[in-house]
Every structure is written in structure tokens, then in C-alpha cells.
Image: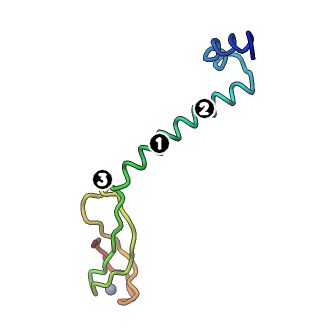
Amino acid sequence: MGLFGDILRRALPAAAMFIPIPGVNVAVAAGIRGAIGATAGAAMAKKGETRLPIYLSCTECRERTYTTEKNKRNDPQRLEFKKFCPRCRIHTVHREVR
Ligand SMILES: [Zn+2]
């Protein structure tokens, strides 16, 4: 790109903020978005163990009626939900079992 390219590259942070150059702004924004996406992806891969599969068991008949998953950090205690049990055919308390 030559001299103009050099000037543009040196002035880029300021230019991106104050001068609306469509092509340059889009490129900068895409670059930032790409960097954020890469960081988030790496962080998410690390936190994979907190989300665990669980069963919800009917407290009346002990049937494991539902499978779901929970975040161990948000819900360290045993979860309880009122849910329909197809065996009892009524709504009963379902408690988490692993
Ligand atoms: Zn039941």
C-alpha cells in the first residue's frame, strides 16, 4: 500500500475512533470480535465440568422420570421440582439423583 498505508496503519487507532472510514472500521470491529470470540471459547472449554447431567426422581414412586442437567456452582444443593409423574399420574415432588 506504500506511504498512505504506513500513515493509515500508524493513525489507525485514532482514525477508527474519529474518522468514519467504512472499510477500516468494519475490519477493526471484526478483528476485535474475533479476539473476544476466541477468548470466550477457550474459557468455556475450561469450565466444562460445572454443568452435570442429573436425574429427577419422583419422591412417591422413586421412578426416574426426567433427565436434565444443572450447574453445580449455581445449585450446589439437591434440586427439587414439582413435576408430573407418568406413573403416579399426578404432580409430585421430584428430587435430584445422579
Ligand atoms: Zn411417581
* Residue at 53% from the left image edge and 35% from the top image edge: 35
* Mark 3 sits near ligand 1, with its Cβ under 8 Å away: no
27, above or below 3, in the image = below
Residue position marked by numbered label 3 in the rendering: 73
Callout 3 crowding tier (Cα within 10 Å): few <14, some 14–19, many ≥20: few
- Is label 3 in contact with label 2 (beta carbons under 8 Å)? no
- Please tell me how many numbered marks the rendered image carries: 3
Q: Percent from the top left, x then y, of residue 70?
A: 36, 62
Locate residue 14: give its quadrant: top right
For marks 2 and 1, give the CA distance: 14 Å
> In this picture, is 81 found above or below 41?
below
Image point (58%, 36%), residue name: 33
Category of crowding for the residue at label 2, using alpha-carbon neighbours closer than 10 angstroms: few (below 14), some (14–19), many (at least 20): few
Q: Which quadrant would the C terminus be assigned to in this image? A: bottom left
Residue 94 at x, y = what percent?
31, 76
Q: Which mark is residue 40?
A: 1
Q: Earlier in the sequence, mark 2 or mark 1?
A: 2
Residue at the location (40% across, 87% down)? 86
For badge 3, the amino acid type reads: Arg
> In the current view of this chain or complex, which residue is farthest to the left?
77
As helix, strand or loop, the secondary structure at mark 2 comes to helix
Ligand 1 falls in quadrant: bottom left
Query: Can you identify the residue that label 2 sits on?
Result: 31
Label 3 vs label 2: CA separation? 33 Å
> Residue 22 vs residue 75: left or right?
right
In the rendered image, which quarter is residue 89 located in?
A: bottom left
* Amino acid on which the number 1 mark rests in the picture: Ala
If you read the primary sequence from the N terminus, does the residue marked by circle 3 or circle 1 appear first? Answer: 1
Q: Label 3's element?
A: loop
Expressed as whole percent of the image width and height from the top left, the position of residue 44 reads 42, 48
What is the quadrant of the N terminus in the image? top right
As helix, strand or loop, the secondary structure at mark 1 comes to helix
